[in-house]
Image: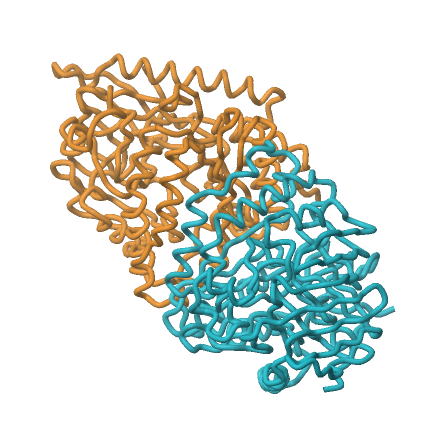
Chain colours: A orange, B cyan
Amino acid sequence: MSMISMPTEADFSRYAELAVKKGVNIQPGQQLEVRADISQAPLVRHVVKAAYAAGAKQVFVNWSDEETSKIRYFDAPADSFKEFPDWLKARFEQLAEEKTAFLSIVSDDPDALNGVESSRISDANRAAGQALAKWRQYVMSDNVSWSIVAGASEAWAQKVFPGREDAVAALWQAIFAATRMDQEDVVAAWDTHDQSLRSRAKLLTEKKYAKLHYTAPGTELTIGLPKKHVFLGGGGPNADGIDFIANMPTEEVFTLADKDSVEGHVSSTKPLSYSGNLIDEFTLWFEGGKVIKAEAKKGQAALDELLNMDEGARRIGEVALVPDDSPISNSGLLFYNTLFDENASCHLALGRAYSTCLEGGPSMSQDELAENGANDSMTHVDFMIGSAEMNIDGEQEDGTREAIMRDGNWVI
Amino acid sequence: MSMISMPTEADFSRYAELAVKKGVNIQPGQQLEVRADISQAPLVRHVVKAAYAAGAKQVFVNWSDEETSKIRYFDAPADSFKEFPDWLKARFEQLAEEKTAFLSIVSDDPDALNGVESSRISDANRAAGQALAKWRQYVMSDNVSWSIVAGASEAWAQKVFPGREDAVAALWQAIFAATRMDQEDVVAAWDTHDQSLRSRAKLLTEKKYAKLHYTAPGTELTIGLPKKHVFLGGGGPNADGIDFIANMPTEEVFTLADKDSVEGHVSSTKPLSYSGNLIDEFTLWFEGGKVIKAEAKKGQAALDELLNMDEGARRIGEVALVPDDSPISNSGLLFYNTLFDENASCHLALGRAYSTCLEGGPSMSQDELAENGANDSMTHVDFMIGSAEMNIDGEQEDGTREAIMRDGNWVI
């Protein structure tokens, strides 16, 4: 019986270069922040090397250790989760003001915080969410370049490939397949893919739909789109005109919902790992844009904590379209990680909208954003609703409807 | 042929508890900062657990990765080493103002930065030294609790036990022996040891020596002591009266020198690992307290960079006495790490004095400290001068002399 081999140093080097050049697209003299678990050190070192080779002035690695975090969640006093250090808030803001690029390497165990009192997690998320409001605006308006890529960890790999001795290697292989690392010229492959997503987004923007209608088993949903909505896909420019790609992989085209115009109900089609806990088989009911009822077969407490984060956590910030016939979806793998699962499925996000999804949005005030239908929240959590049984129609201002997706795939 | 075994989880747990309870002596509700290389994660997790068990409010782990740091030192642009981030300065100061305890786990490769342009290292040290001046004052006046302990890393272990397959395990064994972890009741062993060092320090303080005379091969040195000098040893209280032990192991009793009254020359007896480079077989010549000549058989450039850090880097801040007949010295091991080698040998430190070594020092202004003979600098680097051939005399104000050490050991 043969085993899958672990990536070589050359593989890590190539992947690091992809993240640095196509992901955050580091410019000479720029700073880079890399967030990673210590288990990702072999990859991080290549990222740091690639960033300096690209001319980075300084790379700050913001290490975490999932095991240490777990100890805190179980053992620290409950009150401490309501605090967020001023210096940590200052750190993120100063880095963003200095136009630092932000690269996250996600490798989370989907079940990491299983068994932790849910109020501890929501207190911590709320404290961080409030403290990092300003930083979040920098990032979510693409004022700075940012990117999220993945690295395989033992715990995550065991969730995706349970019981396999070569689970970590197999997960790396799946990550590399999803990020086109299996193509000979990975940068050229990304350029082609990027162009195709941008074209699709342009086409949808020009349709000027007023509403989207979703139907699928467990789903009957209508989402109003703001007049100034723009569909985005692939890479795009930051405030200084430097292109970057915020997610690798990415298969989606997305825009924002009108925060007050979501009606009906929608059911999840994949489990959602939210803050170290799985939420699965859930349905949300909307009225006037707001979730008025939420039921989950698994993870009800985590779902409730998410919805109760703040006012905006009950409203839709992002609407994303992904065909069922897409590479990650066709792999048949369930990643238990949003970066992958959201790119295998149409999805929505509860919480804050990307201001880049509104024409002129990045320069709008918070009030102007709200007037134009953009939702505000300290959270932004994507959840998967797509399947081979989903149909989506677009409705124009004048009431004419056309099919956008049938049986989960593009017909437009 | 038998191999030494790696520490068990139980060993790490016991060692972590020693560091948390006797080292920084965490109090309920207090914060702890742990600085460690990612290679020390197995120990760090036990430290975090022990800190929460002792009632810590929050533990911040400040991870580093020697491999990543090396990449920076070789690949980052030269100018970047002159910068130190404001947020990092703010981080240290805020933590100290909040009475956070600081625990360092040192595991450095003594040769880590071998081959790096020395100006990069000195620029980085100077930038950090200037930025962290305020924080350094908190720590060096024992305003907050702090402690330095060690963890074995592969690169360090290979330096101490070259070519041995079980080098890391052997280094752990040596670390544990030096920290009395081989005693059944390690806390009781530390209490006894602590009392013995405190008694020795009290005896020496009461002698009210005006000068110390050192003679050994390559050494003819006279060090003036300030009138208000106090010898310290073992643990001591922080500003809030909580005892802590700043170094584990510790075998020294120490005070400060009069910064203007050091005359003669002194030769090193062990190599000094300074910022990732070894300095060995060096002699310093003093006039009026200041180094006027410095010659090293190895690491001259690093020695020069150290002496040129600032005005105070050429003057003595600390005078420490350690008998040649002490546990670490008797192990016969050369650790290439100051935490161990300084506790096997009489030593001096170039740079800043501990204000706690002056009666009333912690509440003195910088000017008052200087008037009382205390040296100021952004650096503090211990170097080893003791041996079995060293004799030390104490001289009273009235000129009477008595033997303190003969052939490297106490005679007082």
- Say which quadrant the N terminus of chain B sits in: bottom right
With respect to residue A246, does B309 lie above or below?
below
Q: Nearer the viewer, residue B90 or A106?
A: B90
Q: Quadrant of residue A317?
A: top left
Which residue is located at x 46 percent, y 69 percent? Answer: B362
Q: Nearer the viewer, residue B40 or A178?
A: B40
- Say which quadrant the C terminus of chain B sits in: bottom right
Which residue is located at x 56 percent, y 27 percent? Answer: A55
With respect to residue A205, does A83 lie above or below?
below
Residue that extends furthest to the front in the rendered view of this protein: B398
- Residue B3 in the figure: left or right of residue B178: right
Please count the marks in the image: 0
Instruction: Give x and y (percent) for residue B64.
Output: 57, 51
With respect to residue B197, does A95 lie above or below?
above
Q: Is residue B89 visible?
A: yes
- Residue B178 in the figure: left or right of residue A80: right
Instruction: Give x and y (percent) for residue B248.
Output: 61, 71
